[in-house]
């Protein structure tokens, strides 16, 4: 069990650029979640997949954000036309309803938009 | 809309002392989690509480859940410096996603 992995760990970009993050869940987990965490706050839910189906999206997820999980394994989160307010830690988590359903978090991708 | 409140948000305590921190939530839920986060790191799962009256213990930490009061407590016994971290409670809102509190930053001083 290698845990949830995320890539890159850090991303610095200029305002207006597009960025894409990747998340690889724990292999037996069919549920995958994206959260965003800003300094001094708890994580906020963005979106959730069960297998390849995106089942829920937060109101926080503007139309500049898109997430995919094409084969029900890894997932990508893309932010188009980044804004300074997008600077945050983006956390991915995975779980399985057959293994207790606890969400296990990856190390996160820290995004800085200049 | 489910809201989760933690208190206190900051705690500085001496090694060897005991303390209890609180997590209140606003609507019925079946699951409550406690996570630990070290600076610059991700979240580590500590406890999952699934039913009224559930109590779980790991080392110097003990968590309990009262679903009728919509309250969970995390009790720290004989604190040590290694417990210094931010502790989050999170409640499942009925649709698999977690709603987190703001976290409680704990500093344990020698």
Image: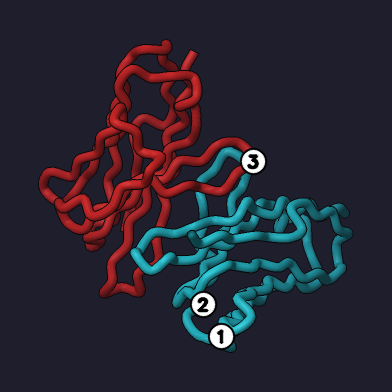
Chain colours: A red, B cyan
Instruction: Determine contact: label 2, label 1, CB under 8 Å.
Output: yes
- Residue B104 % position (x, y): 70, 54
Dot 2: element = strand
Disc 1: which chain?
B
Q: Is residue A111 left or right of residue A79?
A: right
Seen from the viewer's position, the closer of residues A1 and A51 is: A51
Q: Quadrant of residue B22?
A: bottom right
Question: In whole angstroms, how far apart are the C-alphas of marks 2 and 1?
Answer: 6 Å
- Vertical placement of residue B54 versus B39, above or below: below
* Label 3 Cα crowd, 10 Å radius (few <14 / some 14-19 / many 20+): few
Q: Is residue B15 left or right of residue A21?
A: right
Q: Which mark is residue A84?
A: none
Number of labels in the image equals 3
Question: Which residue, given by chain and number where applicable, does mark 2 sit on?
Answer: B49
Question: Which residue, given by chain and number where applicable, does mark 1 sit on?
Answer: B54
Q: Residue at x 57, y 67 (%)?
A: B26
Dot 1: element = loop
Q: Is residue B9 left or right of residue A89?
A: right
């Amino acid at each position: 069990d290698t845990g949830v992995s995320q890539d890159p760990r850090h991303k610095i970009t200029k305002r207006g650029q597009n960025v894409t993050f990747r998340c690889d869940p724990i292999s037996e987990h069919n549920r995958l979640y994206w959260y965003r965490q800003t300094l001094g706050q708890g994580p906020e839910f963005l979106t959730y997949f069960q297998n390849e189906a995106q089942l829920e999206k937060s109101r926080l997820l503007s139309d500049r954000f898109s997430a995919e999980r094409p084969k029900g394994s890894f997932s990508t989160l893309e932010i188009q036309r980044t804004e300074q307010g997008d600077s945050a830690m983006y956390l991915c988590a995975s779980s399985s309803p057959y293994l207790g359903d606890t969400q296990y978090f990856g190390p996160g991708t820290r995004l800085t938009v200049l | 809309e489910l809201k989760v409140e933690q208190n206190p948000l900051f705690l500085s305590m001496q090694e060897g002392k005991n303390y209890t921190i609180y997590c209140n939530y606003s609507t019925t839920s079946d699951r409550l989690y406690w996570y630990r986060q070290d600076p610059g790191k991700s979240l580590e799962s500590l406890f999952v509480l699934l039913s009224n009256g559930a109590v779980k213990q790991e080392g110097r930490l003990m968590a309990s859940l009262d679903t009728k009061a919509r309250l969970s407590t995390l009790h720290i016994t004989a604190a040590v410096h290694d417990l210094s971290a931010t502790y989050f409670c999170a409640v499942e809102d009925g649709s698999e996603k977690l709603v987190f509190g703001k976290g409680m930053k704990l500093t344990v001083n020698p």
